[in-house]
Amino acid sequence: MLTLFFIVLLFVFIGKMIHLAFKFAWGISKIVLAIVSFPLILVGLAIAGFMWVSIIILIIAGILSLLTGLVTG
């Protein structure tokens, strides 16, 4: 009985660790996308001659960051 209890707790612990690992990986990928990929995409659009698209994307991102900053406090 004690062995069964230990096995159940071990599976719960492993499940929580896997969940934590996925949350961590998702957070890291969002940071990498925001810091590395987004500016590279904007620079690529500007070099390719799509400055108007870059400006629209920057305006939308600015408005969204302003609104989320006001909502979260």
Image (spheres, rainbow, N blue to C red):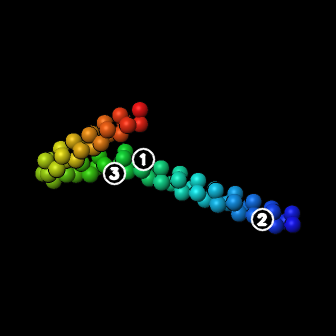
| Secondary structure type for disc 3 | helix
Residue 69 against residue 53 in the figure, above or below: above
Residue where numbered disc 3 is placed: 37
Image spot of residue 34 (x, y percent): 36, 47
Q: Closer to the camera: disc 1 or disc 2? A: 2
Q: Position of residue 27 (x, y in %)?
A: 47, 50
Answer yes or no: do the residues labelled 1 and 2 have beta carbons within 8 Å?
no
Q: Residue at coordinates 81% horizontally, 67% vertically from top-left?
A: 4
Q: Residue furthest toward the front?
A: 71
Q: Residue at x 58, y 53 (%)?
A: 20
Residue hosting label 2: 7
Q: Earlier in the sequence, mark 1 or mark 2?
A: 2
- The residue carrying pointer 2 sits among few (fewer than 14), some (14 to 19) or many (20 or more) residues within 10 Å by Cα, namely few
Q: Is residue 46 visible?
A: no
Q: Secondary structure at mark 1?
A: helix
Label 1, on which residue?
31
Q: Secondary structure at mark 2?
A: helix
Q: Quadrant of residue 19?
A: bottom right
Q: Is residue 8 above or below residue 67?
A: below
- Disc 3/disc 2 C-alpha distance (Å): 43 Å
User: Which picture quadrant has residue 5?
Assistant: bottom right
Q: Estimate the spatial distance between the alpha carbons at disc 3 and disc 1, rounded to whole Å.
A: 10 Å
Query: Looking at the figure, which quarter contains the C terminus?
Result: top left
- Residue visible at 33% across and 51% down in the picture: 37
Side of 71 where 50 appears, left or right: left
In the image, taking residue 12 as reference, residue 23 lies left or right, namely left
Q: Check disc 3 and give the amino acid type.
A: Ser
Up/down of 4 relative to 64, above or below: below
Indicate which disc residue 3 carries. Answer: none
Q: Which residue corresponds to the image point at 12% horizontal and 51% vertical from the top-left?
A: 49
